Amino acid sequence: MKKDTDFAGMKKKMIIAVDGYSSCGKSTFAKMIAREMNCIFIDSGAMYRAVTLWCIRKKFVSGSYIDMQSIVEGLESINVDFVMNPETNMYEILLDSENIETQIRSLDVAKYVSEISQIPEVRNRMVEIQRKTGAGRSIVMDGRDIGTVVFPDADIKIFMTASVDIRAQRRYDEFKARGIDIDLDEVRNSIVARDIADENRDISPLRRAGDAIVLDNSRMTLDAQMSWIREIIQKKFDEGRG
Ligand code: DC
């Protein structure tokens, strides 16, 4: 990227929305963009996972049981925040000041998160926090509804996809790297179930925004994805400088 491509040089803040299917590498990609552009990154999926972990801990969900009333009543008291980890230079999620970055990646959380993220009151509260976080500054945010609902006027909208098998293999490799013994089919089934739930829910379903650019990274390295986005950002930057 050219040295002068910096949000500081732009007349207005820039919002980059990265939406798409689960386990496409949205967060890794969005994090890299934010680091390179020197702006904040928010993983909105982590916020829904945090609420889900909170529900599990409070025993508001278990098996097929969901205590909707307690979840809705307790929502206002949930404190979800992000903190920079100076060692990794990455933002990590806090639930009531506790760092839960690792705990939210469990299969147990993955099992319930689609259900919890369908609750309208949960979505309203998360969208409110997301908009507040992005107000008045440049930001890269990844999720399912960032370009369609949270920031419909985002400057750049990316819609990511990759084949189910490749996504399952990547997630499986991540679990293995963390020393978690898991079955590839179980990971694949969890991804397929979440795709179906994300696309078919009534509220804010996963959809490509009309003005989003599709990125199928099935056969792309992260470097190739970064080269691709650099050109898009450079073009936007050039347009915005006039
Ligand atoms: O990106 P992820 O897999 O960590 O997201 C976890 C879940 O949260 C996913 O199944 C759908 C939900 N989600 C959502 O409904 N809206 C978002 N903006 C982000 C995630």
Image: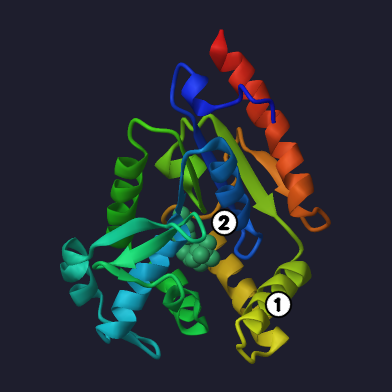
Q: Residue reaching furthest top?
A: 242
187 vs 29: above or below = below
68 vs 85: above or below = below
Mark 2 Cβ and ligand 1 under 8 Å apart: yes
Left or right, residue 190 beside residue 170:
left
* Residue drawn at x 53%, y 29% as measured from the top left: 155
Residue 165's label in the rendered image is none
What's the residue type where badge 1 is placed? Asp
Q: CA distance from mark 2 to mark 1?
A: 16 Å
Q: Position of residue 91 (x, y in %)?
A: 44, 56
- Label 2: state its secondary structure: helix
Residue that badge 1 annotates: 173
What's the residue type where badge 2 is placed? Ser
Crowding at label 1, few (<14), some or many (≥20) Cα neighbours within 10 Å?
some
Q: From where the camera sits, is residue 60 visible?
A: no
Left or right, residue 135 beside residue 233:
left
* Residue drawn at x 46%, y 35% as measured from the top left: 152
62 vs 148: above or below = below
Q: Position of residue 84 (x, y in %)?
A: 40, 55
Of the residues under marks 2 and 1, which one precedes in the sequence? 2
Mark 1 Cβ and ligand 1 under 8 Å apart: no
Q: From where the camera sits, is residue 20 visible?
A: yes
Q: Nearer the viewer, residue 127 or 138?
A: 138
Residue that badge 2 annotates: 27
